[in-house]
Amino acid sequence: MAWCYPKNWWTMLDTPYKAQVDLLIKILPIIDEEKVFALKGGTAINLFIRDLPRLSVDIDLTYLPFDDRKTALQTITSSLRKIRGRIHRAILNSTVNEVAQKDGTVAKLTVQTEEAQIKIEVNTIMRGHLFEPERYALSGAVQDAFEQFAEITVVSTAELFGGKICAALDRQHPRDLFDVHFLLQNEELTENIKYGFISALLSHNRPIHELLSPNLLDQREAFEQQFVGMTNAPFTYDDFEITRNQLIEEIQKILTDEDMVFLISFAEGEPKWSFFPYEKLKKLPAIQWKLQNIQHLIKANPEKNAVQKKALLDKLAENN
């Protein structure tokens, strides 16, 4: 899936994001020492899978083990504190702050130097993994541009891009749609990526139909203020809107009758697990959490659940 760019193409861009990426790359080997984590999100896609079509300045991590919640939160906290200490020792004049959740769990660090600031964040709900993670080195373009090397564990391609698709439908941020653009235009929306998407879809805190048929947001301000200057490939706001519409259409096309039966059964609180090919799905904490919420809603507010189910049925009926 790599994209190839001229050697040292980075010198063609004048952007304040460069210092952030440089700091991020220095921190990645420190994070890699904690084997409970795998990299996901835009940094994994653009610095490891692809040859840097855009910059990414955040480190998003998945906690891989299938531990119970208490053990997982304790391990996440202790692992991030180890990372914090290593960053202090390895990067001179760095300030590393913990960001604690209400229960005291440390799931986020902010790292600041005189030149840059980045964040490191672990999703405490979407833990575990559907497919085996993989090892990647920084892409050739990144190594050339920053004259650094790093290797790290990355979530599976299926979950990486499946999660990215879900984020693109949810946030509709230009960065997410940019990443999806190349997947749709030049790569392949594989069956396993579809399953990775379904896993992310069912793990999300929003109702299923809201992601399959999202209200389209005006993202011009985000495009200008949070996207322009981060890419080495042309991508206009028109491209953003075209990609968003294409993504919604592609998702409708790839969902089979079996997929739709499974989604409906999940929304009813009684999943037909046999309609999903990977048994590990039911073990994912986020899936269990979402299913419990649906079952609670059915008992506490059956009218609201009925409205959501009808919206899902109406949406899936458009596929036929």
Image (tube, helix red, strand yellow):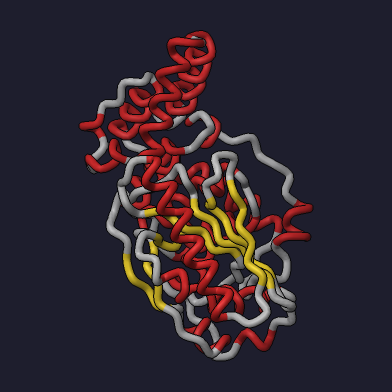
Residue 21 appearing in the image:
yes
Residue 91 is situated, as x and y percent measured from the top left of the image, at 59, 80
Residue 181 appearing in the image:
no
Residue 230 left/right relative to 105: right
Q: Residue at x 56, y 49 (%)?
A: 168
Q: Residue at x 53, y 90 (%)?
A: 147
Classify 218 as above or below 23: above
Residue 215 is situated, as x and y percent measured from the top left of the image, at 64, 35
Position of the N terminus, as image quadrant, is: bottom left
Of 146 and 28, nearer the camera is 28
Classify 307 as above or below 188: above
Q: Quadrant of residue 90?
A: bottom right
Q: Quadrant of residue 284?
A: top left
Q: Residue at x 53, y 70 (%)?
A: 85
Q: Quadrant of residue 199?
A: top left
Position of the C terminus, as image quadrant, is: top left
Residue 288 is situated, as x and y percent measured from the top left of the image, at 36, 32
Q: Residue at x 33, y 41 (%)?
A: 68
Of 233 and 238, nearer the camera is 233
Residue 86 left/right relative to 154: right
Of 148 and 112, nearer the camera is 112
Classify 13 as above or below 289: below
Q: Count the numbered circles shown.
A: 0
Residue 260 is situated, as x and y percent measured from the top left of the image, at 35, 30
